[in-house]
Image (cartoon, grey):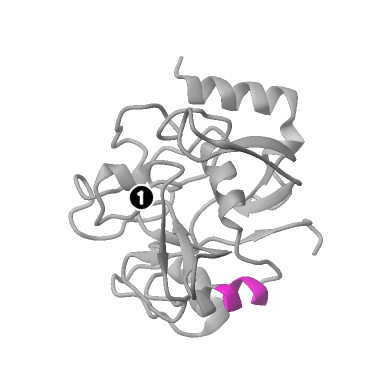
């Protein structure tokens, strides 16, 4: 049995309320410490519990709230892209949520793993859309295998905006995308962009502190 599968099963059996929220498109990430950064050279960080979306925000959901769809690739179940950081922030606020911090994002992506990728140390196209298999485009959210907490596309498909600031005026993005090589799929990998820029390989997912907020 694969390590990620075993972690998920044990987590579900021991702490089912920590895995799934009442909202089927959210996962509760338990409070506690995790190692942020590359394997063997990380820094311990402690976070309170939070909820995070199971998938990237789709074009269908974005259109329903905002009334427009800026995406280059069209499809209601494709991730929305070509959104600025401000667009992503405003959408999350409109649905009673927020963007995750980069450390929240990384903790959720790793799902307890200590390897380069959340599934192990070797590239596995069963878990991610990236340059080698994506055929130069995005794909429907949730069409690859999830991580041990049931989160989809935490590697590949589209980069995801976070709320965290980079040096200067930039914002941090996580996860890699359909146009990147496998090294961008590493759970600790990060890049930055100015918040008013928009790209056809950048989307987002939302988070929140309390399920009732």
For the record, the magenta segment spans 89-94
| Residue most extreme to the bottom | 67
Q: Residue at x 51, y 85 (%)?
A: 67
Residue 40: x and y in percent read 48, 27
Q: Specify the quadrant of the image occupied by residue 8.
A: top right
Q: Residue at x 73, y 32 (%)?
A: 16
Q: Residue at x 67, y 28 (%)?
A: 12
Residue 122: x and y in percent read 31, 28
Foreground pick, 186 / 111: 186
Look at the picture and state if 22 lies above or below 6: below
Q: Specify the quadrant of the image occupied by residue 120.
A: top left
Whether residue 132 appears in this view of the structure is: yes
Look at the picture and state if 65 lies above or below 10: below
Q: Does residue 137 appear left or right of residue 201 in this picture? A: left
Q: Residue at x 81, y 60 (%)?
A: 212
| Residue most extreme to the right | 212
Quadrant where the C terminus is found in the figure = bottom right
Residue 190 is one of the magenta-drawn residues: no
Look at the picture and state if 68 lies above or below 148: below
**Tag 1 residue:** 156
Query: How many residues crowd mark 1 within 10 Å: few (<14), some (14–19), many (20+)?
Result: many
Q: Does residue 37 appear left or right of residue 183 in this picture? A: right
Identify the secondary structure beneath mark 1.
loop
Q: Does residue 135 appear left or right of residue 48 in this picture? A: left
Q: Specify the quadrant of the image occupied by residue 32.
A: top right
Look at the picture and state if 87 lies above or below 142: below
| Residue most extreme to the top | 1
Residue 17: x and y in percent read 76, 37
Whether residue 25 appears in this view of the structure is: no
């Amino acid at each position: 049995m694969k390590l990620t599968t075993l972690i998920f099963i044990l987590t579900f059996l021991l702490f089912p309320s920590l895995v799934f929220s009442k909202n089927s498109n959210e996962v509760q990430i338990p409070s506690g410490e995790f190692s942020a950064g590359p394997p063997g050279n990380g820094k311990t960080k402690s976070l309170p519990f939070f909820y995070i979306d199971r998938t990237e925000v789709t074009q269908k959901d974005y259109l329903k709230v905002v009334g427009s769809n800026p995406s280059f690739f069209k499809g209601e179940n494709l991730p929305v892209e070509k959104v600025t950081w401000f667009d992503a922030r405003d959408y999350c606020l409109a649905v009673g949520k927020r963007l995750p911090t980069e450390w929240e994002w990384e903790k959720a992506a790793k799902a307890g793993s200590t390897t380069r990728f959340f599934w192990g140390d070797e590239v596995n196209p069963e878990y991610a859309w990236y340059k080698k298999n994506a055929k130069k485009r995005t794909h429907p959210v949730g069409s690859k295998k999830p991580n041990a907490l049931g989160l989809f596309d935490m590697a590949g498909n589209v980069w995801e905006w976070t709320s965290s600031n980079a040096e200067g005026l930039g914002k941090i993005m996580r996860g890699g995308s359909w146009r990147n090589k496998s090294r961008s799929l590493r759970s600790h990998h990060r890049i930055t962009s100015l918040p008013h820029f928009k790209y056809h390989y950048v989307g987002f997912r939302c988070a929140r502190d309390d399920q009732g907020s």
